[in-house]
Structure formats: structure tokens, C-alpha cells
Amino acid sequence: MLFLEVPVRTTIDIPEREHTLYTSLARAQRTSFSKLLLDLARRGLESANRVADAVPVYRVDPQTGLGVFRSGRPVTLDDVKALEDDDAPCAREAS
């Protein structure tokens, strides 16, 4: 089957701030506004597919079968107790 690429005109609403940014990017890349938006849309769709296919960034503990996550700080017993009790303030809020 043969597909012909026929341009289709459409209208989209773009906030002024983003319009200014996209116009600047198009000028810097020496391309048209339309081509820039098409390129950005294609990249966004491609990256969404890569994210969906990505391998999780955590490992599974072979003994428990639970996910093991890295934290930005050590998780204390007080943190766990605060999460167990819905009425208790989180340890982060207390410090």
C-alpha cells in the first residue's frame, strides 16, 4: 500500500510563553515552527515508548520477592511506625 504525505493544516492553542520558546528554538535550529513542533512531538512519543519498555530501576529480593528501593536517606523505625499509625505525623514533619 502506498501512502502519500499530504500536509494537513490544523490549529492549536499554545500559551504565549511556550510559543516564544518554540519560536526561539526554531530560529536557533534554522527550521520552521511546524517542523520543530512535529520533531518535538515525535521525540515525545518515542521517549514514551522507551519509558514503557524500560527495565525497572529497582531489584527484587530473591528471598522475599519484594521490590528493593534505594532511599535518599536511611529509613528509621520511627518512619515505619509513623506510617503504620495514620494519625501520627510523619517523622520528616516532626524534625
Image (tube, rainbow, N blue to C red):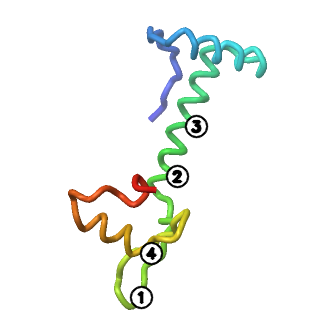
Q: Nearer the viewer, mark 1 or mark 2?
A: 1
- Label 1: which residue? 62
Amino acid marked by disc 3: Arg
Q: CA distance from mark 3 to mark 4?
A: 31 Å
Q: Position of residue 31 (x, y in %)?
A: 72, 17
Q: Earlier in the sequence, mark 1 or mark 4?
A: 1
Q: Nearer the viewer, mark 3 or mark 4?
A: 4
Image marks 3 and 1: residues in contact by CB distance under 8 Å: no
- Label 1, secondary structure: give it: loop
- Label 3, secondary structure: give it: helix
Q: Earlier in the sequence, mark 2 or mark 3?
A: 3
Q: CA distance from mark 3 to mark 1?
A: 37 Å
Of 19 and 33, nearer the camera is 19
Q: Earlier in the sequence, mark 4 or mark 2?
A: 2
- Label 4: which residue? 68
Image marks 1 and 4: residues in contact by CB distance under 8 Å: no
Q: CA distance from mark 4 to mark 2?
A: 23 Å
Residue at position x 65%, y 17% in the image: 21
Image-based side of 38 in relation to 76, left or right? right
- Label 2, secondary structure: give it: helix
- Label 3: which residue? 43
Residue at position x 50%, y 12% in the image: 15
Q: Earlier in the sequence, mark 1 or mark 2?
A: 2
Image-based side of 85 in relation to 57, left or right? left
Q: Residues within 10 Å of mark 4 (few under 14, many from 20)?
A: few
Q: CA distance from mark 1 to mark 2?
A: 27 Å
The image shows residue 80, relative to residue 26, as above or below, that is: below
Instruction: Identify the mark at residue 50; answer none if there is no mark.
Output: 2
Amino acid marked by disc 4: Val
